[in-house]
Image (spheres, rainbow, N blue to C red):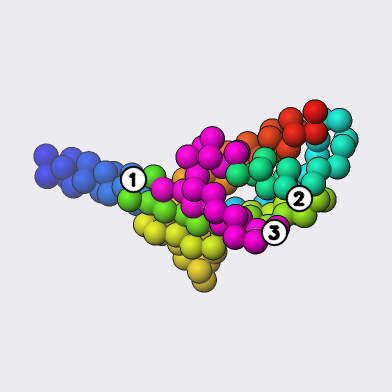
Amino acid sequence: MKRLVSAFAMACLMIVVATGCRGAGQVYNIADSPVSTATGKELTMEQIQKAIVEAGLGLKWIMAPDKPGHILGTQNARSHTAVVDIVYTTKSYSITYKDSVNLNYNADKQTIHQAYQGWIRNLDNAIKGRLMAAGS
């Protein structure tokens, strides 16, 4: 009986360790994603800024344009916060990790909680969609 309890405890510990290890992944950045519209029309800097801000707001990001070609994006989810730099031109945009709170960011390994990757993928997809529609 003692062996069974010990084996069960060891199995539970292994599950906890394995689950914790899957909680982090590489920091996901978007580099030089093309600004594309459905019609192929080139957008102005103002139109691109509007599309990016609206995409973020639709996903509950706080979007703060601070100068032409740059937006600071902040995502708050419960006690977790991610901050990204969004840099854009009329040809491309990039989303780059800036800071975080309670997301287990490791600067040496460049890893962060997996939720961050999902937030960035969703933001990128929303931006692509808004840019596509902006050219109509």
Q: Position of residue 33 (x, y in %)?
A: 75, 48
Q: Is residue 85 above or below residue 6?
A: below
| Amino acid tagged 1 | Arg
Mark 2 secondary-structure assignment: helix
Q: Which residue is mark 1?
A: 78
**Left or right of 34: which side holds 8?**
left
Q: Nearer the viewer, residue 112 or 78?
A: 78
Magenta-drawn stretch contains 60 = yes
Q: Circle 3: is it few (<14), some (14-19), or many (20+) Cα within 10 Å?
A: few
Q: Residue drawn at (79%, 46%), measured in percent from left and top?
A: 44
Q: Is residue 59 visible?
A: yes
Q: What is the count of numbered marks?
A: 3
Q: Position of residue 106 (x, y in %)?
A: 47, 65
Q: Which residue is mark 2?
A: 45
Q: Is residue 85 visible?
A: no
Q: Which residue is mark 3?
A: 68
- Determine the CA span between mark 1 and mark 2: 33 Å
Considering the whole magenta stretch, tell me its main secondary structure.
strand
Q: Nearer the viewer, residue 26 or 72?
A: 72
Span of residues in magenta? 54-76
Q: Residue drawn at (28%, 44%), measured in percent from left and top?
A: 11
Q: Nearer the viewer, mark 3 or mark 1?
A: 3
Q: Residue drawn at (21%, 46%), measured in percent from left and top?
A: 9
- Determine the CA span between mark 3 and mark 1: 31 Å
